[in-house]
Image: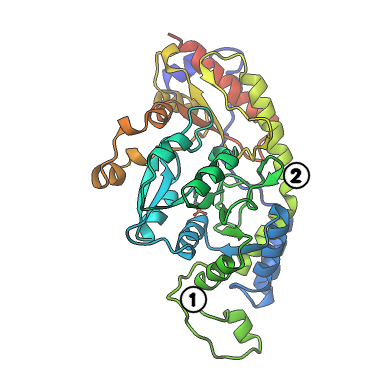
Amino acid sequence: MSTRAQQALSGEHSSWPRTIPFSRPDISEEEIAAVVNTLRSGWLSIGPETQAFEAEFAGLVSARHAIGVSSATAGLHLGLNALGVGAGDEVLVPTFTFASTGATVVHAGAYPRLVDCDPEHLNIDLSDAARKCTRCTKVVVPVHFAGHPCPMDEVQGMAAERELAIVEDAAHALPAKYHGRSIGSLSPITVFSFYATKNITTGEGGMVTTDDAVLAERVRGRRLHGMTREAWRRYSGGPWRYDISYPGFKYNMTDIAAALGRVQLKRLPVLQARREALVGRYQSALADLEEIELPVSDPGIQHAWHLYVVRLQLERLRISRDEVIRCLNDAGIGTSVHFVPLHQHSYYRDVLGYRDEQFPHATAAAERIISLPLYSRMEPADVDYVAETLRAILRYNRR
Ligand SMILES: *Cc1c(COP(=O)(O)O)cnc(C)c1O
């Protein structure tokens, strides 16, 4: 442990040696049994488990169609592809997001037009999005940062006015609601992630939802080579002949992943209640700390609380965000930063020419944010330890 962290912790809590990872999947014996059953079933690739998972997922988010894919990244690529996005098109992408949101636009052959964030929730700034629309803009990709829904009425208003399609990056937003409606039921395409750190996991995996039968058919076909008949139907006694109507991708979910996902989905209400309780505990434990700004939740929305992101008031501190993270790490606490905005990565800076000045809100937020540990298996005492450690670090390093 560094001297600074030691000094900061030399109060009443120095007797708390804990190791708290940033994230940890919540896998019970039930998930393990479901995966083992699938392994024993003789069918590992896409098949009946995926189909059942899709039906259950569609029911949960009130979408007509849900299509299981190998990742949210694959889902975003498929969604853009199904909408016909290609060379010469532009797609509005918030800079405050993960690599996939931008990369999949490039994969589709289009140009990622980066957009600043709103300073409150770090979601897409719609006035900046409107400014950046051109004749070539075809799609807007709102990302529900940390699980707080974007203002979808306004997103839909802007999209309607400018004839844009909407592809929601809902990797953080299961189960989130906007004005009583589930994320996953609002836009032509919504994409969820089941990566290991997400609110539910299939190891790797994702889901695309839509109410549009034509888009659903395209995403469904193109996730598996663009073939007209999926293998599990051909191999189980159906006709052997198939046609390739489109040079599709290999982006399907597997039944091993789906078996895991079905149990996770069933447990989601319990997992989510724990997340909410832990967030409540953080919020009250940190409420009086003037050196940080806590996340806020708007009325009329249900927050998925995928991440718990605090912002440092650097004006009040003698140390940087990176040093605060080092002190937390020294005390056994794993953290993360969501995100280094896309425009600060070398591809976007050096190849596409984006600069900090074009994104004042995202640039200001980027050096202040820390994602604290939040996962359903976390104990309330872990939250207390993180909160007290953070308090000690910040108090000791006050300006
Ligand atoms: C995790 C994440 C993704 C990618 O999810 P994968 O399932 O790992 O491909 C996309 N967008 C955001 C905002 C994410 O956090």
**Disc marking residue 20:** none
Q: Which residue is mark 1?
A: 226
Left or right, 356 with reference to 321 = left
Q: Quadrant of residue 317?
A: top left
State the residue at coordinates (56%, 59%): 205
Q: Quadrant of residue 42?
A: bottom right
State the residue at coordinates (49%, 26%): 328
Report the mark closest to the observer, 1 or 2.
1
Residue 313 appears in the figure: yes
The N terminus lies in quadrant: top left
Q: Horizontal and vertical percent for residue 311?
A: 49, 24
**Disc marking residue 270:** 2
The C terminus lies in quadrant: top left
Q: Secondary structure beneath disc 2?
A: helix
Q: In the picture shown, does residue 77 fall above or below 276?
A: below
Amino acid type for the residue under numbered disc 1: Gly
State the residue at coordinates (42%, 75%): 247
Q: In the picture shown, does residue 216 fall above or below 279?
A: below
Amino acid type for the residue under numbered disc 2: Val
Q: Secondary structure beneath disc 1?
A: loop
The foreground one among 182 and 200 is: 182
Q: Horizontal and vertical percent for residue 15?
A: 61, 20
Left or right, 117 with reference to 202 = left
Left or right, 55 with reference to 130 = right
State the residue at coordinates (67%, 46%): 175
Q: Horizontal and vertical percent for residue 142?
A: 51, 45
